[in-house]
Amino acid sequence: MKPPKKWKFALMVWMAIYPAITLLSYAIGDALKALPIPARTLIMTGILVPLMVYLLLPMLRKILGNWLNT
C-alpha cells in the first residue's frame, strides 16, 4: 500500500488536531493560565501527541482510508 498524498495526510491531521486542541483548551485551559508558556505547551503536547498517535489518527485513517489512498 502506498502512502497517502501529503496534502490529504495534512488535511487529516488538521481534522484531528484542531478539535482536539480546542476541546483540551476549554477543558484545562483555565487551570494552566498561571503556568509559563513552556510549561503549558509541555502539558498540552504531552496530552495531545499520544491522543493523536494512538486514538485520533488511527480512527480517521480507518474512516478516510479509501479517500486517502485514491
Image (cartoon, helix red, strand yellow):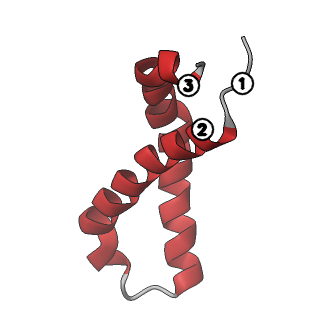
Query: Where 61 falls versus 8 (above or below)?
Result: above
CB within 8 Å, label 1 to label 2: yes
CB within 8 Å, label 2 to label 3: yes
The CA distance from mark 2 to mark 3 is 7 Å
Which label belongs to residue 68?
3
The amino acid at mark 1 is Pro
Q: Where on the picture, by quarter, is residue 50?
A: top right
The amino acid at mark 3 is Leu
Q: Label 3: state its secondary structure.
A: helix
Which label belongs to residue 3?
1
Q: Label 2: state its secondary structure.
A: helix
Indicate which disc, 3 or 1, sits on the residue closer to the N terminus: 1
Q: Label 1: state its secondary structure.
A: loop
Q: Nearer the viewer, residue 70 or 54?
A: 70
Q: Residue at x 54, y 72 (%)?
A: 41
- Dot 3 crowding, Cα within 10 Å, few <14, some 14–19, many 20+: some
